[in-house]
Image (tube, rainbow, N blue to C red):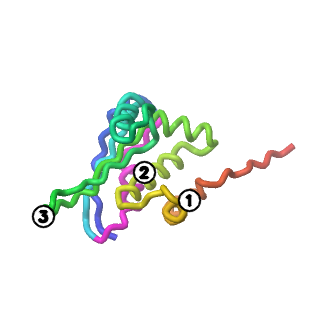
Amino acid sequence: MSALTVDVQNVFDGPGVPPDDELQAWAQAAWLGPDASEVTVRIVGTDESQALNHQYRGKDKPTNVLSFPFEAPPGITVALAGDLVICAPVVEAEAREQNKPLASHWTHMVIHGMLHLQGYDHINDEDAEAMESLEIRLLSRFGIGNPYIQEETVKDS
């Protein structure tokens, strides 16, 4: 595993965003490339997320994470993985709806986005299974369980 430089841009004015060093650690853990590279992790609010999601994916709503892999022109070699844009309010709402710790969901979103930057996808079942399996393995390094199963909570009567 090679070094990854992580540039964090937090333009979201609100609570709940993990510290830069945690975002960097999660991104670095998910960098599987053989070469050193650089990624920008941009934390945004709903307006910027919705605008980007509409422009690049044709979906007029904010989303949790968008991945923009860097595509160098032919003959140009630049050590850039690309950009992740993570919408803080969407991540927080999803964590609440899914009864997951906020930090765990942030970890998942960074790892998920980093895998997209490296060409992983979940468009078909086979690709989704490979990507999810890798996510589960990477999340376990941080003590986080499988985010794709709904854990039943047992309450004492």
Q: Amino acid at mark 1?
A: Gly
Q: Secondary structure at mark 2?
A: helix
Kindly report the distance in space between the C-alpha atoms of the residues bearing marks 1 and 3. 42 Å
| Quarter of the picture holding the N terminus | bottom left
Sort mark 2 into few (<14), some (14-19) or many (20+) by Cα contacts within 10 Å: many
| Residue at mark 2 | 110
Question: Is residue 103 in the magenta section?
Answer: no
Residue at 30% across / 40% down in the picture? 9
| Residue at mark 1 | 143
| Quarter of the picture holding the C terminus | top right
| Residue at mark 3 | 75
Kindly report the distance in space between the C-alpha atoms of the residues bearing marks 1 and 2. 15 Å
Q: Does the image show residue 136?
A: no
> Percent from the top left, x then y, of residue 145?
60, 58
Residue at 36% across / 59% down in the picture? 28
In the displayed structure, does residue 76 sit left or right of residue 11? left
> Percent from the top left, x then y, of residue 155?
80, 45
Kindly report the distance in space between the C-alpha atoms of the residues bearing marks 2 and 3. 30 Å
Looking at marks 1 and 3 on the same chain, the residue that comes earlier in the sequence is marked by 3
Q: Amino acid at mark 3?
A: Gly
In the displayed structure, does residue 152 sit left or right of residue 59? right
